Image: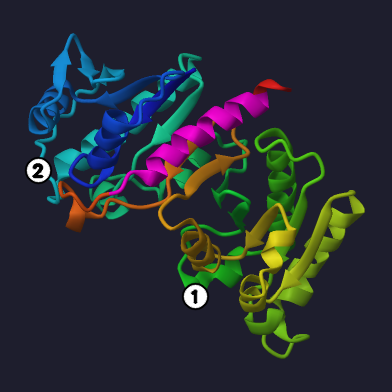
Amino acid sequence: MHVIISCGDVNGIATDIFFKTCLYHAFHDMQCSIAINQSTAKEICETWNIAFEDSTIHFPEMSVKVIPCKNHATYKPGKPSNDASLLAIESLETSLELINNGEADALLTLPISKSGLHECGWMFSGQTDWLHHAFPESHPIMILFHESMRIALASIHVPLNRVSETLNTQTIIDVIYGVHHSMKIDFAIEQPRIAVLGLNPHAGEAGMLGTEERDIIIPAVEQAKAKGIHCEGPFPADGFFSRQTWKGYDAIIAQYHDQGLIPLKLQAQGHGVNFTANIPIIRVSPDHGTAYDIAGTNRVEEHSMIASLEAIRSIVKNRSRG
């Protein structure tokens, strides 16, 4: 199993989680490669006292091949730079090209600085949005998961005051269908049970607190049911999580970013995985950002990186079953 890793922002905690994972948690059944500038890789290896020879990073229990990128970034943990952002962009593009050519089974993207990349001309709201551009005929769905909690987003990196205008019945139907399909092929759940959260407080309170449930969400749920999908909702989000109702479902569709990610991250406690469903390739990522404030310190934990590699193993296996 070959995994391509995009280096992310090397001056954020992407470097820390990658090196700590490879140092202390060898994945012997995986061949890993990382797209990064050779000089940058050498600088990092010298800092971490890891051997770098023949375009390969030699950890005690595993080796990682370096796929060379042209853009060099000086390794300065905790210090954002345009060079690091340009390298992150090139690493993503190089990694995607390789996996599209069939040279790898999965893509693991390390954390980027969205604002940093934007300053360098990158016009996407995040890596999921970038993948939508790369696969324009697909409808990428962000699914964050930890163990039995799997949360998909109907809208992703959208300002809160614009969420309502981005939602419509067809959008939610597409997410329901995509999540249903992903639960079956990626998570090996034959009869997935899907819950849909409301947008407004109390799921709109019969229209008193908003009409999106009545006008948009309920019609989507009913259409999905008519197609034989086990789908229920809309549920008021607060009670759904506080009363542990979520445990009765295989997947949950949240209407906006924080509605879904806050309960997921509380549940995962740093072990969550970001998975992009409904695209031709397998792509996962740790469920956190660059965290410049702790980059290069002993405070960085690699749990989400480990969980991401374990998720790749599981999803590749599930998809191979056909």
The quarter of the picture where residue 16 lies is: top left
Question: Label 2 is placed on what type of residue?
Answer: Lys
Which of the marked residues, 1 or 2, is nearer the chain's N terminus?
A: 2
Q: Which residue: 53% across, 66% down?
A: 263
Where is residue 306? Give x, y as percent: 41, 38
User: How many residues crowd around disc 1 within 10 Å: few (fewer than 14), some, or many (20 or more)?
Assistant: few
At 82% from the left edge and 44% from the top edge, which residue is drawn? Answer: 191
Classify residue 318 as left or right of residue 105.
Answer: right
In the rendered image, the residue lying farthest to the top is 54
Residue type at mark 1? Asn
The reply to whether discs 1 and 2 touch (Cβ–Cβ < 8 Å) is no
Name which residue lies at 22% across and 53% down: 299
133 and 189: which one is in front? 189
In the image, the segment drawn in magenta is 301-319
Instruction: Look at mark 2 in the image and give the residue it sits on.
Output: 76
From where the camera sits, is residue 70 visible?
yes
Q: Is residue 163 magenta?
A: no
As rendered, which of 6 and 140 lies closer to the eye?
6
Residue 249 is situated, as x and y percent measured from the top left of the image, at 73, 57
Query: In terms of secondary structure, what is the magenta stretch mainly?
Result: helix
Q: Residue at x 56, y 59 (%)?
A: 155
Residue 280 visible? The answer is: no
The percent coordinates of residue 179 (x first, y second) are: 69, 47
